[in-house]
Image (cartoon, coloured by chain):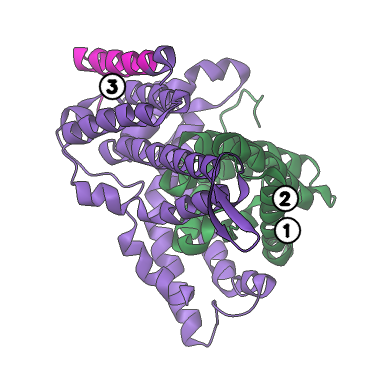
Amino acid sequence: MWGVSAVSLIKSITIGQYLPGTSPLHRLDPRLKIISLILYITAIFFVRTFAGYGAAFLFTSFLLLLARLPLGYVIRGLRPVLFLVAFTILLHFFMTKGGEVLVRIGPLTVESAGVRLGLFMSLRLLFLVVTTSLLTLTTSPIALTDGIEYLLKPFKRVGLPAHEIAMMMTIALRFIPTLMEESQKIMKAQMARGADFESGGFLQRARSMAPLLVPLFISAFRRADDLAVAMEARCYRGGEHRTRMKEMVVTPLDYWALAAVTAFLLLIALSGI
Amino acid sequence: MQKQKEPLPILAIARAGIIAALYIAVTLVLLPVSFGPVQLRVAEALTVLPILFPEAIAGLFIGVFFANIFGGLGLADILGGSFITLVAAAVTYRFRHSIIAYLSPILFNAFLVSLYLHALFEWPYWLTVVSIGLSQTVVVFGLGYPLVRLLKKIQKS
């Protein structure tokens, strides 16, 4: 079934996408936005009680409001992780023991400690996904890679090619839609020739991917060769002395954002909620 | 690759970028079965590519990084998953002439990804090891191995 559903699913993927806008969150410097996200996620790992998640909920809602993102869009982005949430809940409901016995189904019991842990971990998961998508929804891929390149700079000393890695990221982001479209085309073409991506066991299903992957890979490698020739023809010479069309500038707004997230982290860490 | 002073050849940069895009595109197209504890991430078949191209190490690192941004479990998975892939890919390249090249993406992912999934979301460790290990084995040997043989043949001709 998923051979067909995969083809139609792409339209519903919202995670990782960028929604252009002019909200304060969109205008933040990508470098500080990445650092703020890391701090915020650290804060979420410090949360000990459901009251802590209440605070995180308020803070996240505030950010969502500030970003002026369509709420339905953000919620739809959660759909792919709902399976994981359900898995986490079931796992803890039935495997984590302690406290009162709430439900008994034959040899299986659901105990209060399991219910608590299951809900707690699912909330953590949901918050991680929402906060990460807050970054990707409000930051263009180019700004994101520029920010990453800047943050990788200190590692240049140990030989990390920061610019080259950022360039690879830019190429990757540029070619994702192209290759996705191509893989769908190949899938449909192979299905028309009787390829079956759906049935069979675990191994069978993996093997059935070969008619999709082999042509896809070969054409992708050919594309890489063409791209290299095109870059060479335009005299691409790596990171030295390269200038940008949009310079990254840190504004007071960025410091306010960083201060707010740091305050939230301290509140959670020190109050123990 | 890391230590050299010369800039990377343009073809290597382009190829690494495309390998990353391939990993992400395949992961997203097959999303319904890509994520989750019983994951069959077909894109993991690419983890054997360092056998053929050293730049695939960087490509895979970036691929996993973005694929996990788009549909993973947040920052821990983004950083953890991509660094584990980086190490596994470097080992694959280092031992590209032996079976270790194929075992590396299976073992590193099974044991280390489970470690942080256990630490972060308290999933049972060994169950996760078995599930990830099984799916990696299927993808790497069922798909990655024939793929490398085919690409080698094409390279020769």
Residue A184 in the image: state x and y as whole percent.
42, 70
Subunit of mark 3? A
Query: Which numbered marker is on residue B95?
Result: none
Judge whether residue A247 is colored magenta.
yes
Residue at 21 percent of width and 30 percent of height: A62
Is the C-beta separation of discs 2 and 1 under 8 Å?
Answer: yes
Q: Is residue A108 above or below residue B69?
A: below
Q: Which of the 4 image quarters holds residue A210?
A: bottom right
Q: Colour of chain B?
A: green
Q: Which residue is mark 1?
A: B137
Q: Is residue A127 left or right of residue A21?
A: right
Q: Quadrant of the C terminus of chain A?
A: top left
Foreground: B151 or A192? A192
Task: Report if residue A30 lies within the magenta region.
Answer: no
Give the SS element for disc 2.
Answer: helix
Q: Earlier in the sequence, mark 2 or mark 1?
A: 2
Which quadrant of the structure image shows residue A126? top left
**Label 1 crowd bin: few (<14), some (14–19), many (20+), radius 10 Å:** many
Identify the subunit bearing mark 1: B
**Which circle marks residue B106 in the picture?**
2
Residue B108: x, y in percent? 71, 42
Q: Colour of chain A?
A: purple
Q: Which residues are magenta?
A: A245-267
Indicate the amino acid at tag 2: Ile
* Distance Cα–Cα, label 2 vs label 1: 6 Å
Where does label 3 land, which residue?
A: A248
Residue type at mark 1 is Thr
Front in this rendered view, residue B2 or A118: A118
Badge 3: residue crowd in 10 Å (few <14, some 14–19, many ≥20): some
Amino acid, disc 3: Met
